[in-house]
Amino acid sequence: MNCNETTKNYYRVDKLPHIWCPGCGHGTLMNAVVRAVEKLQLNKDDLVIVSGIGCSSRAPGYLDFNTLHTTHGRALAFATGIKLANPKLHVIVITGDGDSSAIGGNHLIHAARRNIDITTIVFNNNIYGMTGGQYSPTTPYGDFATTSAYGNIDKPFDLCSLAQGAGSTYVGRATAYHVTLMQRLIEKAIQNKGFSFVEGLSICPTYYGRKNKKGDAFEMHSFYKNNCVDIRVVEKTPEKGENKILIGEFHNDPKPEYTESYQVIIDKFQGMGGN
Amino acid sequence: MAYKLVQGNEACVEGALAAGMRFFAGYPITPSTEIAEISSQKLPQYGGKFIQMEDEIASMAAIIGASLAGVKSMTATSGPGFSLMQENLGYAAITETPCVLVNVQRGGPSTGLPTLPAQGDIMQAKWGTHGDHPTVALTPNSVQEVYEYTIKAFNIAEKFRTPVILLMDETVGHLREKMLIKDPSEIEIINRKKPTCKPEEYIAFKSDDSIPPMAAFGEGYRYHVTGLIHDETGFPTNNSQIADNLIRRLVGKVENNIDDFSYYEEYKLEDAEIVILAFGGVSRSAKSAVDKLRSKDLKVGLFRPITMWPFLEKQISNIAQKVEEIFVAEMNLGQYYLEVDRVAGKYCRVEKINKVNGELITPDEIISVIGGKYELQRNN
Amino acid sequence: MNKFEIQLSGSGGQGVILAAIILADAAIKQGLNAVQTQSYGPEARGGASKAEVIISKEEIYFPKVTKANILLALTQNSYDKYIANLDKDGILIVDDHIETDGDIPGKVYILPILNNANKKFETRMVANIISIGAIYALLGEKVINKDIMINTIAERVPPVTVEKNIAAFKEGIKLIEGIYD
């Protein structure tokens, strides 16, 4: 396969092409992860990528790291075990909107609350793609899915607010269109010693797009291009944020990290007691 | 070395630490909570880690994650939590991740009888997670055995790369009695086989003896782990032949090696015509009953499986061919009886003695069933 | 007697479980077999609480008390609930505030356990250890050496209360021996 140095270095080239549909935003988001890892020059042997189930969660299979494709929603719980067992490892979780906030919602808020040093990247396509287009916790109100034939009456999560409210010490959002921002946010998220959360708005022309007449991949990308505003712009000129999707770095407030706090306990008590 | 008064749940932690457990993830649930409490206190003293997770699903996930990072790991729970752990128990089985899951059984179904003993999770231990999979479950009946068999549970998990269930019951978990902590030099410890090849030559799920060597994340062997059916390289496939091979290998590596961990106790079986088959807390009552029935000139013996799963088919079949009747006494409505009857039923009569009210079956209850039947027969 | 089945009952918080643990621990240190069990659940938070110890020279299989050789009841509630468990030749020890039935088989010791804990030690917390003293006096030195008992108590109670608890243990012995006098 013809590919550049980055691809050769960080992908399992023999596992490509990936399974995602034509036009899917996930490949772009996955590549933002790879570029961030490359930029930070992380040792591939020390990096673990953990995923759950769904379209997003197929990403680790293509990446040449220690990779773990787990059960639906549980990626963060597995990742917590890995990180706590060996804090020297960099742990990145790649998850989806349903995986992270429906079946895995409990694990998300508790991993965030602990501020354990895991970088969570959500590929949010507003739908369950792998199972054929059912509504997810981020499907907008009124939108259509194979299980919301008459329009969705669930109210969607704002995943970044959820993560921040739960205690995530780094939070940001970009889209499959805003690739360089996505990469930058991931870099900073990895560098944050604590729980970091980056939402990558993806596009799903196959299910969400088609069900809701959002057009093809080009049109869906164009929507992000025309309707996203960086939080820094809105902070200066609030009216520019009206009816727009906010992107950028929302929250960066380091706090004591879980595995470091645990190490303090070990340092104090190791060798004491009945050992 | 002197004996100490130890509680069953405490013995479990002592055994786990002796076996090399350095990671515990759990969620509070009666009657297993002491295992988490004591682990939280002791693990940092050993340089190990304890974490209280948000639920039992997460606890099982976390210990698998820790084991993949190379650390021997355990969780402990009871019925309701055991139900939640089934999902990732299957994940541990298909990904061949060694770990130990302790279930201190209480009355069920659902929330049931939280503080009282039962043995209602026998079939769940075997079939609780979906799909065909290997199952190893051990059932100790004393505090000393909890210690010893927790160590063995880790050894089996490590040797065969499979999750192992320590199936206790509340009676044994909360019992305090004497225990001898062994000197580390007297304890056999088995560790997972590690790859010796170069990373680029490592084929993560390929093996010569059906148990592939296991690298830990971070050791330079970058490989893929999935709960999907996978080929030897660890990557998903729908290939029917590969799927068939994988499932047969996973089940076979345990079932074909049962002789390696067939643990049981035989008590006064040599001349026995009647056998009580019991395990865990009930087996203590059964042993008392054997002695008392013997004093009534009934030739009664006890067979006590410690290895619950895989089923000790060979041993039970042998006994069945020599005796008139086997009474399976258990704190459920006849779960293990189903297996005993399947194997022994063609050679001898198989009867049930059951109780599901949260109380341990007493020696007198066993005696009245067996004594009642056989003394009556003799008098006729 | 080769085997003693002892049941200790009271209300949650009176320390009957600790008392049972101390008896079992001391028996094991003496080289005997002992098993200790207890009732769990809401009892631990105020209702009738029960702990059991079986001490034997032989191996103990069935770990529960069938018929108690010694039954301790520190509350009316626990007396009412567990009196039926007393063996026909068993010994009953009750606190003196408890109203007992007239026709209890075996021996009955009505002792001012709670009262003396309050009066002599200014804390109800030692009632369990006074009870151990009384039970110990009935078991006798032949079953468990007194120094072993005292050492076990010292190991199992909070360090700052060791002296007080040892005194409470001796008080319990006196309560029984006083009756003998």
Image (spheres, coloured by chain):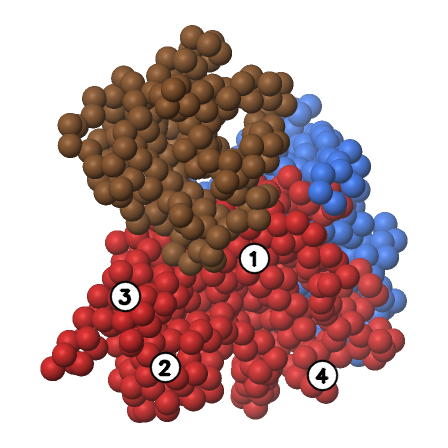
Badge number at residue B272: 2
**Real-space Cα separation, disc 3 to disc 2, in angstroms:** 16 Å
State the residue at coordinates (23%, 43%): C88
State the residue at coordinates (32%, 42%): C68
Q: Give the mark nearest the N terminus, 3 or 2.
A: 2
As drawn, the chain in blue is A
Query: Chain C: what color?
Result: brown
Count the marks: 4
Q: Give the mark nearest the N terminus, 4 or 1.
A: 1
State the residue at coordinates (42%, 80%): B269
Residue located beneath label 3 in the image: B366
Residue C92: give x, y in percent of width and height: 30, 32
Discs 3, 1 touching: Cβ within 8 Å: no
**Quick check: do tags 4 and 1 share a chain?**
yes
Amino acid type shown at disc 4? Ser
**Real-space Cα separation, disc 3 to disc 1, in angstroms:** 25 Å
Q: Chain of mark 3?
A: B
**Real-space Cα separation, disc 4 to disc 1, in angstroms:** 36 Å
Badge number at residue B144: 1
Residue located beneath label 4 in the image: B207
**Real-space Cα separation, disc 4 to disc 3, in angstroms:** 48 Å
As drawn, the chain in red is B
Foreground: B337 or C15?
A: C15
Amino acid type shown at disc 2? Ala
Q: Chain of mark 1?
A: B
Amino acid type shown at disc 1? Gln
Q: Is residue C19 left or right of residue A257?
A: left
Quadrant of the image occupied by residue B362: bottom left
